[in-house]
């Protein structure tokens, strides 16, 4: 299946140096770039790209907070099966906090941002640099992108959204996006998700509970709402799960109400997450929750107000997509055996946005998804080398190249 000759591939591999990847990753994580103040991280990435001779465009989302883009233009006439590829990652990290200081330990580079996701960005740069050093000429444009404002709640996805504008306008051309983080597997589907808050209120005011029948207390009806959620959960668990990202879910994280043991809680708020499988849409989910609230409002005579935020449609890139096939072939060759498996996750990420809002099929492929957001964040150098090789070969497979 591969359209890359063995000699070309050997030349590319010879340009990928695990030690250099490790050093660049360590230097990158020494640059603090917490969300909102990630300018230095973006500039480090830009310098890394310039060092390898790539032209860089900085796109300021806010003063001092640039997205980074670097396009390697295709050479010669494009062939019919040439496809433009975008590599993507984020230059911000969650707060450094009390995480282990940046260091090296055997096969590990340690520190905030190693796995999530400066290691992947470095592997991306080394992959594309290896292609250029080996004289590989791609038949379609290849664009490397680093975005700001990824990590919530400080990040509002402002970097990804700016990139989406460029994808939609055609300023950045993409037939597929590979996000260079995640498990060492082709993460090709995620559930959709929304954060809901149901506020149950009464117009009685905060009066003594002796004056109010318990049947009219918002706290009781919060309980009934939770029971309805439990009934939904039972429905979800008996329905067919999505083969990659599992079943639909509803769960609760916040429960607020009342301020004194015998005063009526006038407002009780229930906040949680509702996740749904590819094939279903946000509007179906909203209608279902709204119906539940309306029914309980009618039964109780209380007000049930539903608010939904951070809505993300699910994404699923089909196994037959050329980008998935390119990654399968590349991972098969690099590991010398079986192709990387397709996986899905319950959690949502930027692929949900790029696929649904940007209209470009997206998958993740990264060194690991094990220590991100922990205080002992680390990344394996062997896995970064693996990723660099997979990215290089997948780019050749997907974009096509002139032999
Ligand atoms: Zn990340």
Image (tube, rainbow, N blue to C red):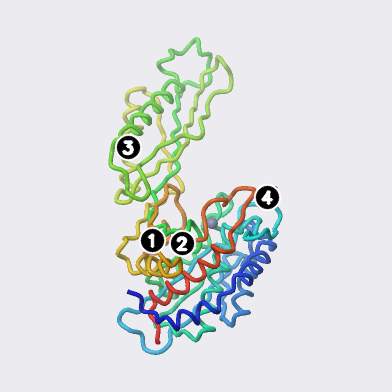
Q: Residue at x 51, y 13 (%)?
A: 209
The image shows residue 369, relative to residue 230, as above or below, that is: below
Disc 2 target residue = 365
Query: Which is closer to the viewer, label 4 or label 3?
Result: 4
Considering every residue shown, the one lying at the far front of the view is 337
| Front-lying residue, 285 or 34 | 34
Label 2: how many residues lie within 10 Å, few (<14), some (14-19) or many (20+)?
A: many
C-alpha separation, residue under disc 1 versus residue under disc 2: 15 Å
Q: Residues within 10 Å of mark 1 (few under 14, many from 20)?
A: many
Q: Disc 2 versus disc 4: distance between alpha carbons?
A: 24 Å
Q: Are marks 1 and 3 in contact (CB under 8 Å)?
A: no
Residue assigned mark 3: 236
- If you read the primary sequence from the N terminus, does the residue marked by circle 1 or circle 4 appear first? 4
Q: Nearer the viewer, mark 1 or mark 2?
A: 2
SS at badge 2: loop
Q: Nearer the viewer, residue 93 or 202?
A: 93
Q: Position of residue 1 (x, y in %)?
A: 32, 74
Name, please, the residue furthest toward the top.
210
Q: Which residue is the site of mark 1?
A: 355
Label 3 sits on a secondary structure element that is: helix
Measure the alpha-carbon separation of dots 4 and 3.
Answer: 37 Å
- The quadrant where ligand 1 appears is bottom right
Earlier-in-chain disc, 2 versus 3: 3
Q: Under 8 Å from ligand 1: the CB of mark 3?
A: no
CA–CA distance in space, label 1 to label 4: 33 Å
Whether label 4 touches label 3, CB < 8 Å: no
Q: Is residue 38 above or below residue 281?
A: below
- Crowd class of label 3 (few under 14; some 14 to 19; many from 20; radius 10 Å): some
Q: Would you name the residue on which mark 4 appears? A: 99
């Amino acid at each position: 299946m591969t359209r890359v000759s063995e000699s070309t591939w050997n030349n590319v591999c010879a340009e990928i140096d695990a030690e250099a990847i490790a050093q660049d990753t360590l230097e990158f994580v020494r640059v603090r770039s917490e969300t909102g103040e990630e300018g230095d991280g973006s500039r480090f990435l830009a310098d890394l790209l310039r060092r390898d001779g790539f032209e860089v465009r900085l796109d300021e989302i806010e003063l001092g907070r640039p997205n980074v883009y670097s396009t390697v233009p295709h050479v010669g006439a494009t062939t019919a099966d040439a496809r433009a590829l975008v590599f993507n990652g984020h230059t911000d990290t969650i707060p450094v906090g009390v995480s282990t200081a940046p260091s090296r330990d055997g096969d590990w580079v340690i520190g905030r941002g190693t796995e999530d996701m400066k290691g992947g960005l470095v592997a991306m740069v080394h992959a594309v640099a290896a292609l250029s050093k080996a004289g590989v000429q791609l038949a379609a444009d290849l664009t490397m992108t680093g975005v700001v404002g990824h990590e919530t709640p400080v990040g509002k996805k402002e970097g990804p959204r700016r990139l989406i504008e460029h994808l939609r306008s055609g300023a950045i051309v993409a037939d597929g996006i590979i996000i260079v983080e995640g498990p060492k597997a082709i993460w090709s589907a995620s559930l959709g998700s929304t954060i809901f808050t149901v506020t149950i209120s009464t117009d009685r005011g905060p009066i003594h509970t002796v004056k109010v029948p318990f049947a009219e207390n918002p706290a009781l009806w919060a309980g009934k709402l939770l029971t309805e959620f439990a009934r939904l959960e039972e429905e979800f668990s008996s329905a067919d799960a999505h083969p990659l990202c599992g079943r639909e879910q509803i769960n609760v994280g916040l429960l607020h109400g009342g301020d004194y043991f015998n005063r009526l809680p006038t407002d009780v708020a229930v906040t949680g997450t509702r996740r749904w499988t590819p094939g279903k849409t946000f509007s179906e989910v909203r209608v279902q929750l709204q119906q539940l609230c309306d029914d309980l409002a009618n039964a109780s005579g209380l007000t049930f107000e539903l608010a939904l935020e951070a809505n993300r449609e699910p994404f699923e890139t089909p196994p037959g997509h050329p980008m998935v096939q390119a990654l399968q072939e590349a991972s098969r060759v690099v590991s010398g055996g079986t192709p990387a498996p397709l996986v899905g996750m319950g959690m949502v990420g930027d692929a949900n946005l790029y696929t649904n809002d940007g209209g470009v099929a997206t998958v993740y492929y990264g060194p690991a998804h094990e220590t991100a957001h922990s205080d002992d964040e680390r990344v394996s150098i062997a896995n970064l080398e693996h990723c660099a090789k997979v990215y290089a070969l997948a780019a050749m497979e997907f974009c096509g190249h002139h032999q």
